[in-house]
Image (cartoon, rainbow, N blue to C red):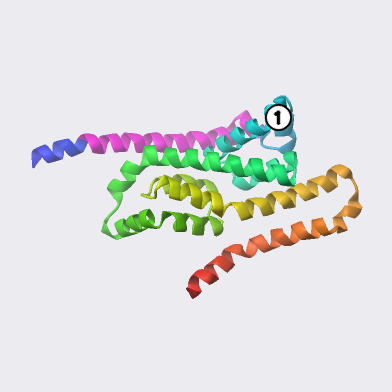
Amino acid sequence: MEQVIESATPGRNKAMIKAFIFVAFVIIAIYIIKFTPVKGYLTAEALGNFLNTAGLWAPLVFVFVYAAGVCLFVPGTLLTGIGAAIFGAYWGFLYVWLGAMVGASAAFWIGRTLGREFAASLIGDKLKKYDDSIERNGFAATLYLRLLYFPFTPMNFGMGLTKVRFWDYFFGTGLGIIVGTFIFTFFIGTLKDVWVSQNWGELLSFKVFFSIGLFVFSLFIPKIIKKIKGEQ
């Protein structure tokens, strides 16, 4: 019996050390965004000027910046809005989606590597059935939560603490964020085009009304999903 306890202790200690590193990472990430000069780059103008120095590599740099921002707990809506304002509705959508996917994958990996062992040790019998369920239905669970607009970054790290398979999480995320990402980038990108052209008459154009309609519709997506889910 003592041998079993002794063999389990190193594993427990290792899990606790990883968990401590994970918590420290989260605290440092939030500190960097809140209290360092990095905060000053989180505007379309500042980041746009920075990307201008990258030339043809600007889209790739933006994807990296977006991914890093996700891991540093920068709000996804802020990063998405900046991407749409810099690159426009269509290219902005592509670069934002790619950045979100890279960031979501990196945050998941951090959560899985540093926090999963400790989280598993805390799961009791009641929670274990949910953990097992999300392993079996990982794609559907991830897709459902993404369509509900569950907070992006917390979910990335949180899913890493569960038993969900990475590829279920990856494809569920990729599909689940497409609609919301396109609607938001199309809305911001359209308004940006009007602002740049200074042709205020375009505010009455079909494209502007369509983008506003999509944006308003997106606000009701979570309610629609919940209602469909409740009727099944």
Q: Determine whether 213 is above or below 28 in the image.
A: below
Amino acid type for the residue under numbered disc 1: Leu
Q: Which residues are magenta?
A: 10-39
For image coordinates 43% across by 39% down, the residue present is 109
Determine crowd level at label 1: few under 14, some 14-19, many 20+ residues with C-alpha closer than 10 A.
some
In x, y percent, where is residue 94?
Answer: 65, 43
In x, y percent, where is residue 24?
Answer: 43, 34
For image coordinates 45% across by 34% down, the residue present is 25
Q: Is residue 79 visible?
A: no
Q: Is residue 218 magenta?
A: no
Which of the 4 quarters of the picture holds residue 72? Answer: top right
Q: Determine whether 126 is above or below 12 in the image.
A: below
Q: Is residue 29 magenta?
A: yes
For image coordinates 39% across by 50% down, the residue present is 164
In x, y percent, where is residue 43?
Answer: 70, 37
Kindly identify which residue carries mark 1: 51
